[in-house]
């Protein structure tokens, strides 16, 4: 008996939100999923990419404003390949309170690297 699998890629239960930014060498890069009155913001995905650099560098990545946060990661940029952090939060992580923004921050990176940050999620009416 065949098994049929249905895939629904539009799984955001609320109003979608997204943010992206880039920063050059030596600059911090930050994106914010906004707060909204009476709403709780959720982060569902985070994508961070970096160019190859002159020498290997490591920098801090922080997600602020979520329950249990801040969450901390390390981004290591290499000479030949650059870097990438791709994270899907299952389930999505809620903000620590209603009307609370969620920020993803990559500390400054030296060595000539450019950083790009993207975060997606949604907002739900608070109960």
Image (tube, rainbow, N blue to C red):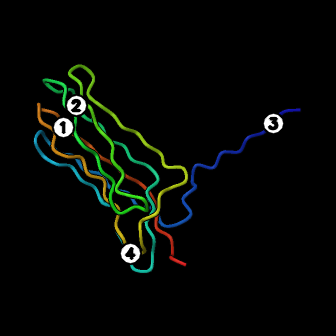
Q: How far apart are marks 3 and 1 (CA)?
A: 46 Å
Specify which label sits upstream in the sequence, 3 or 2. 3
Q: Name the residue under label 2.
A: 51
Looking at the image, is mark 4 or mark 3 nearer the viewer?
4
Specify which label sits upstream in the sequence, 4 or 2. 2
Looking at the image, is mark 1 or mark 4 nearer the viewer?
4
Contact between marks 4 and 2 (CB within 8 A): the answer is no
Contact between marks 1 and 4 (CB within 8 A): the answer is no
x 31%, y 58%: residue:
103
Residue 71, which numbered label? Answer: none
Residue 93 appears left or right of 75: right
Q: What element carries label 1?
A: loop
Could you tell me residue 49's position as x and y percent? 30, 37
Q: Distance between the residues labelled 4 and 2?
A: 35 Å
Q: In which quarter of the image is residue 82?
A: top left
Give above or below for 95 relative to 46: below
């Amino acid at each position: 008996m065949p098994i049929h699998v249905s895939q629904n890629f539009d799984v955001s239960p609320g109003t979608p939100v997204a943010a992206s930014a880039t920063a050059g060498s030596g600059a911090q890069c930050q994106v914010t999923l906004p707060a909204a009155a009476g709403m709780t913001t959720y982060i569902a995905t985070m994508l961070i990419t970096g160019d190859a650099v002159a020498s290997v560098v490591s920098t801090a990545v922080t997600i602020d404003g979520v329950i249990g946060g801040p969450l901390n990661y390390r981004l290591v940029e290499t000479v030949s390949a650059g870097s990438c952090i791709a994270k899907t939060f299952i389930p999505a992580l809620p903000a620590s309170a209603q009307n609370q923004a969620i920020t993803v921050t990559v500390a400054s990176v030296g060595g000539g690297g450019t950083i790009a940050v993207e975060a997606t999620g949604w907002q739900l009416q608070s109960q």
